[in-house]
Image: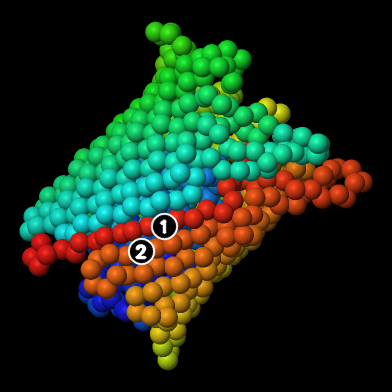
Amino acid sequence: MSIPPLPKPVSTMVPVLRRAVCVGVAGASWGQGARADTGDDPAGLPVEEVVVTAPDEGPVPVGVTRVDPAAVARPGDGVEDVLASVPGVRIRRLGGLGAFAGISLRGSGFRHTLVRLDGVPLNPDGVEAVDLSRWPLAGLAQIDVTRGRPAATVGAAPVGGVVDLWTGQGAGSASAEVSAASFGTVRGHGTVAASGARGDGLLAVDALQTAGRFQYLDDGGTRYLLDDDRIATRDNADRRQLSGLVRGRLGDPSARGTVLVSAAHREEGLPGPIGIPWASTRLRTDRVLASLGGDGQVGSGTMAGRAWSRWRGQQLRDPDGELGGRPSLQRDRYAAAGAQVSGQGALHPVVALRGSLDARVETFARRVDADLAPTQQAERLGVGAALDLPVRPRPWLEVVPGIDVRGLWTLGSEDDGVVAVLPGLVVRGTPEERVGFWLSGTGAFRPPDLTELYGDEGSLKGNPDLRPERAWKAEAGVRAAGAAGGVRGAVETAVFGTWARDAIGWLQNTQRTLVAVNFGRTRTVGGELGGALSWRDLIGIQASLTVMDARQTTDDPTRRGRPVPFAAPWQAWGRVWTQPAALLRLGIDLEGTAAVPVDPQGVERLPSRALLGVFASLDVGDTGWSLSLDVDNLLGVRTGRVDRDPLGADDTRIDAPIVDVTGYPLPGRTWRVGVRWTIPAKEGA
């Protein structure tokens, strides 16, 4: 990845308790003041306005990792690419550039992570797995990753965590970027931002087209039979996507209204799993997100409210009966509408209050072939309330007890619904200027989403008998930062644990179709370490490591003590960069992942992998132009070694394709060339 040198410290006037400064740990940016609306602070507490300078001042430890996309993104990158370096984050893909990319936090599933765009939930209560490849990076100024208990103003209790995508502040500038890459891939995006005395606006457009054809080892879906192995080309993997985002704000922080609209169209082939390829199956997806909100000061506190709606339509065309044995046309429609009100303020010089109320209605309907009436449909109502009571017994210490109540009912059925009461506690402090710590424990809850219940998307099959997931999770961490003699550095480490029951996951059957099931009880414990070190903006290193042990603790003797499928025992990421000349940057990336279990008994595993990448970028003077060249998987690794028969006496090891999900190969060497042009804001814009 192309990454600029660590910038000089940036001074920002912020309330020290209301904003966090996250120092560049494992891909996070240096010197970026946090947003007050993340809710990680007791708004309204009487705090002193001070100048916070990063990285010379240590961060307020809130258990949040901040990523600055402008600092780490390469031309052609998506949201999933800039998140891959964050400790505890694992991005799992179903193919090459632009293919489905889901996020897993600390071994959790795709649906266990809540993703929000400017505070608008894209998957409240984990109602779907967010495909990060479908959300353009263009227009995003900041990404926050919260793994522990989120603030009550978020209004959620996810098992994994929260990923917040924040758009820019409308500073008055424009940019354009185009890149060409392997496998016939072209991507371009542009942004225009403007600001005035009474508001600001942002327009972002992103387009992607790829043939997606790459070579891979086709083992015929029979790992133990070597006679049918061959090098094949991934066909029917093309995709085209166009997406855009418009955001406008009117007013100032004391009283402001916001309108946000995001839409996308995507057409793609579904190549199918190894051994059972699909040559003609196609998927078309259209989505629209709209939000209207406002926020402002109310007395000594703040309040915010928003109403939002989401719509997604999918059309699955199987003209040759590759999925169900006969030609079919399946049309799915998902719609949701909701609202949230949140607020925070001071009750006492050392006590604050913050909370939120939210509600939503979601519907799902499926029509097959020429049927006028839906063959499957469902409608659900979800409500929630959350409350935090931050207490500051010492100037450097904050204790935050809280509670979250979530409820979900299926409308028009005899189902009694489900209600979850989830208490939580967060303790954090900064006993030293550059050292901070945090501890948290909380309950978590996720009902099965409509795809898990009723989905049928070729490679996915729903299960209407699923039960909701419930979990308890805890974490403890320490963060430190410092600078001396031209050397600046930061380190963050944390330990964590999650204990879940009725955990929902996806298992692959003999046809390589993923089927949703309840695993029963699971236990995941582990640790994370991330750090960054630089010398005089000439050379630097960043690294992250996550190690965990995820086990099934169910009463079923055939699975008790076995690994949780798709939870990687360890993963690591590292980068070394240098800037030998003022306008030239060079670097090396290294990524490693352990062998990952894929079945409930932990017998079959995906091969481990270690991938090397290189990057270079050049700024063309002060013209605003920059050029970049990136090569991922430089050595062209497409296979890894696995046991031919893990249950037998034969200890022979064979080659197996590199995959994130069984049957869906990842490409080998991938290059990208990009050009970017930035137009700075004019004076007074």
Q: Position of residue 155 (x, y in %)?
A: 37, 45
> Foreground residue, 19 or 181?
181
Could you give the CA–CA distance between mark 2 and mark 1, rounded to whole angstroms? 8 Å
Q: Earlier in the sequence, mark 2 or mark 1?
A: 2
173 above or below 606?
below
Split into 4 quadrants, where in the image is the C terminus?
bottom left
Q: Left of 57 or right of it: where is 608?
A: right
In the drawing, what numbered circle is on residue 673? Answer: 1
Q: Position of residue 355 (x, y in %)?
A: 32, 49
> Foreground residue, 46 or 605?
605
- Residue at the image position 13 percent from the left and 57 percent from the top: 195
- Residue at the image position 32 percent from the left and 65 percent from the top: 626
**SS for callout 1:** strand
Q: Are marks 2 and 1 in contact (CB under 8 Å)?
A: yes
Q: Position of residue 192 (x, y in %)?
A: 20, 52
In the drawing, what numbered circle is on residue 627? Answer: 2
Q: How is the image coloured?
A: rainbow
> Foreground residue, 327 or 497?
327
- Residue at the image position 62 percent from the left and 33 percent from the top: 273
- Residue at the image position 68 percent from the left and 45 percent from the top: 657
96 above or below 427?
above
574 above or below 481?
above
Split into 4 quadrants, where in the image is the N terminus?
bottom left
Q: Amino acid at mark 2?
A: Leu
Q: Would you identify the image quadrant in which residue 262 lies?
A: top left
**SS for callout 2:** strand
Q: Left of 130 or right of it: where is 255?
A: left
In the drawing, what numbered circle is on residue 444? Answer: none
Q: Left of 242 or right of it: where is 223?
A: right
Q: Would you identify the image quadrant in which residue 680 lies?
A: bottom left
> Foreground residue, 622 or 117?
622
Q: Left of 548 or right of it: where is 580?
A: left
